[in-house]
Amino acid sequence: MTDDLLLDGLVTKAQSGFFAVETPIGDITSQVRGRLIKERLNTDPVALGDRVRISLTEKYENDTVVLQGMIEEVLPRARAFTRQMPAPGGRRGDLPDREQVLIANPDQVVLVFAIANPEPRLRMLDRFLVIAEKNRIPAVIVANKLDLVTMEQAEAVFAEYERIGYPVLYTSAHDDTGVSALHNRLTDQISALAGPSGVGKSSLLNAIQPELGLRVKAVSEANQKGRHTTVHPQLFPLDNGGYVADLPGIKAIGLYNIEPGEIDAYFREIEPFTAMCRFNNCRHLTEPSCAVRAAVEEGLVSPARLESYLRLREEAEAIYYRC
Ligand SMILES: Nc1nc2c(ncn2[C@@H]2O[C@H](COP(=O)(O)OP(=O)(O)O)[C@@H](O)[C@H]2O)c(=O)[nH]1
Ligand SMILES: [Mg+2]
Ligand SMILES: [Zn+2]
């Protein structure tokens, strides 16, 4: 037996208690030590993207030796894309809220939108950015289908995001514009991809690496069949190094674990002005001497971003005060 040997690995797939762990000697299907499950009650004990240590056991299957893994240790997560599951019975119940980990240790989230066909849904983009900021995950924006518009038209929509500090890549999967720049961004990184359907995510992945988009799509479609099915994304290796995962479940992420006042901090260009409002509990709606509204008047904050802010804050308030 080889049980005194511990192997380092990366969890590339997590499903129903079984984990695909990529190790220096290949992919090894693994389970989790019961002790770890008991120690990590308020989170997923092991999740996609976790760095783990496994022990090995040999098993005979049809006269051949198969290696099986047992996850003995989960290394600390640098960051994680999580969804808070409200405890049964709400905040007043005895059970704690529990987090579901969509992906551990992503280096970045890549938010893909089309510049046209379909029209970019900037409200959704702003929601994704809030969730990324909340989870402290760097966000990259991809503005695809550049072939359908002029660069001026594209920048009219997306340059604001560059101005406030998010990298924006302008791409076209149809004529390959920006595809190598996107490829470079993904290389050697663990990237979580998100965006509405029809914007060209699969096409861009296929342009980067044949079949990649098809493989990613097959998984996310299977996940979307039932409304209540748990989402099991998967990390797909890139030939040049790095991994991508599709995050089909991200659209459903609510603002459960976000307090209304916290949202200020997740709009990076709005945040600096909030300290200058006359009232320190200013909601930037109709209060007198609101520095945020003044900043919009002066062209320092875009009206569309303030609108997103107000709507997300309203949503967060509705959830917060209901619980
Ligand atoms: N004009 C144009 N069409 C694109 C581009 N990328 C994808 N499409 C088309 O948009 C549709 C949706 O693409 P798909 O990759 O399946 O989007 P996904 O749902 O985000 O994975 C398909 O008809 C593609 O051919 C692009 O850069 N330019
Ligand atoms: Mg797709
Ligand atoms: Zn204000």
Image (cartoon, rainbow, N blue to C red):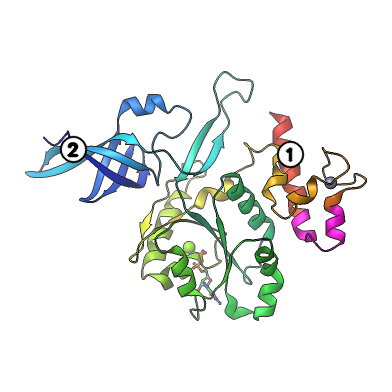
Mark 2 nearby-residue class (10 Å; few <14, some 14–19, many ≥20): few
Q: Is residue 28 left or right of residue 172?
A: left
- Residue lying at 40% horizontally and 45% vertically, measured from the top left: 48
Residue behind mark 2: 5
Judge whether residue 140 can be spotted in this image. yes
Dot 2 lies on which element? loop
Residue 296, percent from left and from top: 83, 58
Residue with the mark numbered 1: 261
**Residue depicted at 48% across the width and 69% down the height:** 182
Which secondary structure class fits the magenta region best?
Answer: helix
Local crowd at mark 1 within 10 Å, few (<14), some, or many (≥20)?
few
Q: Residue at x 40, y 33 (%)?
A: 45
User: Which is more toward the observer, 252 or 307?
Assistant: 307
Q: Earlier in the sequence, mark 2 or mark 1?
A: 2
- In the rendered view, would you say 167 is above or below 100? below
- Quarter of the image containing the N terminus? top left
* Residue 229 visible, this orientation: no
The magenta span reads: 293-306
Quadrant into which the C terminus falls:
top right
The amino acid type found where label 2 is placed reads Leu
In the rendered structure, the answer to whether residue 235 lies left or right of residue 63 reads: right
Q: Secondary structure at mark 1?
A: helix
At which x and y percent is residue 276? 83, 47
Q: Position of residue 174 (x, y in %)?
A: 50, 78
> Mark 1: which amino acid?
Gly
Q: Is mark 1 within 8 Å of ligand 3?
A: no
